[in-house]
Image (cartoon, helix red, strand yellow):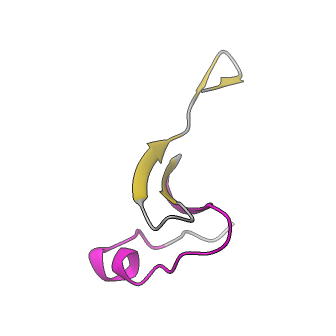
Amino acid sequence: MYPQTPLNDAKIRNLKTKEKSYKVGDFDGLFLLVKATGSKSWRFKYRIEGIEK
């Protein structure tokens, strides 16, 4: 897997809405959730004892 460049302000501002919500990964489980309404929020996915939270 190739290392992905981190999201920066310009990339985030240029993200367009779609019919459904979608995720844009940043690094190590951190991602930006872009909702169909146009809102954007940071989320962090992690695992404790193999269970995704």
Q: Residue at x 40, y 53 (%)?
A: 41
Query: Can you say whether 15 is above or below 28 in the image?
Result: below
In the image, residue 48 sits, relative to residue 20, either above or below, namely above
Give residue 36's quadrant in the image: bottom right
User: How far across and down, in percent of the image, does residue 45 sit?
Assistant: 55, 38
Residue 15 spot, x, y in % from top left: 47, 79
Left/right placement of residue 1 relative to residue 7 reads right
Residue at x 56%, y 32% (from the top left corner)? 46
**Where in the figure is residue 2, as x and y percent of width and height?**
63, 71
Locate the N terminus by quadrant. bottom right
The extreme top residue here reads 49
* Residue 31 place in picture, x, y as percent: 49, 54
Side of 23 relative to 5 (left or right): right
The verdict on residue 16 being magenta is yes
Query: Does residue 29 show up magenta in the picture?
Result: no
Q: Where the C terminus falls, by quadrant?
A: top right
Q: Nearer the viewer, residue 35 or 12?
A: 35
Which residue is depicted at the point 53% across and 70% down?
4
* Residue farthest to the front, as pictured: 37
Magenta highlight range:
5-28
